[in-house]
């Protein structure tokens, strides 16, 4: 199905703004540069985080020069560059490179900073076939005003974002916008992303391919990796929560919250009606 909440890449590039998404805070884009090409910009009234996806980049910003390199998202954790509001920057590709840039309004409380993998908490979350790895790249324990940033790895045949949860201002949750940027291996693989909110008559099931971007504008948003498909997604988040309040937990779907105490989930025993 076609959905305004799913954006397909063009030559590996895509972009969403608050105006395009129909929300208030979060912007996101992915950019490809050939070796020797560069991109100049200014964060203006936004804080931003630059995440290398593949290749080697040199970033000049605020009288500093920083090199970022990554083989690919499935091989290693990234070094991530935090850019405060008002930062002029130039990104140059030392090799062919692909990177993501997310941003949200901020006042300029924190300086430019390079976050390295040893600072990032790596969590094995969930259990049974809802086990996944969460890299806390710009979590509430690392300084940012409004942005949150995570990488999540969901193995073949497993679920993520489970139990389904929401952070859209309903059911006493905080209002926080979220993007899912997907990479899938093999490239022929796929995932299923569901956005649903009973209060808003929203229920969409999206077939996600490598390189797609999905918005979670409201409600719950679980993900399933098809058997044989290993799924990575990059989450940028921003909303009304500031500074330490970014640690506020989302609210589970009341139909499925019980699974935090039983990750196996009472599976059916097979065979049915036959010999064991």
Image (cartoon, rainbow, N blue to C red):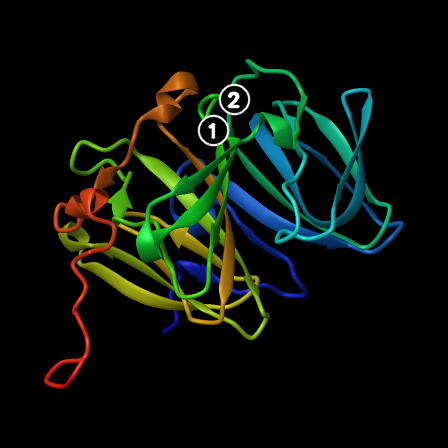
Q: Residue 167 or 253: which is nearer the viewer?
A: 253
Where residue 85 sits: x, y (%)? 61, 23
| Side of 244 where 172 appears, left or right | left
Structural crowding at the residue carrying mark 2, measured as other residues with C-alpha within 10 Å and reported as few (<14), some (14–19) or many (≥20): some
| Residue most extreme to the left | 273
Residue at 16%, 59% in the rendered image: 266
Task: Tell me the SS state at disc 1.
Answer: loop
Q: Position of residue 137 (x, y in %)?
A: 54, 33
Residue furthest to the front in view is 276
- Residue 197 % position (x, y): 21, 53
Does 128 sit left or right of 182 as displayed? left
Query: Circle 2 is placed at which residue position?
Result: 142
x%, y% of residue 94?
A: 86, 46
Distance CA(mark 1)–CA(mark 2): 6 Å
Q: Is residue 139 visible?
A: yes
Residue 196 lies, with reference to residue 250, above or below; the image says below
Name the residue carrying label 1.
139
Q: Which residue is found at the position 56% from the left and 28% from the top?
A: 46
């Amino acid at each position: 199905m076609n959905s305004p909440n799913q954006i397909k890449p063009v030559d590996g590039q895509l972009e969403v703004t608050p105006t395009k998404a129909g929300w208030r805070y979060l912007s996101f884009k992915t950019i490809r540069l050939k070796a020797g090409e560069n991109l100049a910009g200014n964060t203006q009234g936004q804080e931003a985080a630059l995440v290398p996806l593949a290749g080697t980049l040199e970033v000049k910003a605020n009288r500093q020069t920083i090199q970022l390199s990554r083989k690919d998202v499935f091989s290693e954790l990234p070094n991530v560059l935090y850019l405060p509001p008002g930062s002029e920057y130039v990104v140059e590709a030392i090799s062919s490179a692909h990177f993501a840039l997310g941003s949200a309004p901020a006042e300029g409380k924190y300086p430019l900073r390079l976050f390295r993998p040893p600072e990032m908490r790596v969590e094995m979350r969930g259990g049974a076939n809802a086990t996944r790895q969460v890299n806390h790249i710009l979590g509430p324990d690392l300084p940012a005003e409004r942005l949150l940033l995570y990488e999540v790895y969901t193995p073949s045949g497993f679920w993520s974002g489970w139990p389904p949860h929401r952070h859209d201002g309903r059911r006493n949750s905080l209002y926080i916008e979220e993007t899912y940027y997907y990479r899938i291996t093999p490239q022929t693989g796929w995932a299923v992303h569901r956005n649903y909110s009973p209060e808003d008559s929203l229920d969409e099931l999206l077939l996600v391919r490598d390189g797609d971007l999905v918005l979670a504008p409201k409600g719950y948003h679980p993900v399933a990796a098809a058997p044989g498909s290993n799924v990575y997604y990059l989450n940028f988040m921003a909303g009304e929560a500031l500074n330490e309040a970014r640690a506020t937990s989302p609210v589970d779907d009341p139909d499925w919250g019980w699974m935090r105490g039983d990750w196996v989930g009472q599976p059916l025993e097979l065979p049915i009606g036959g010999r064991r």
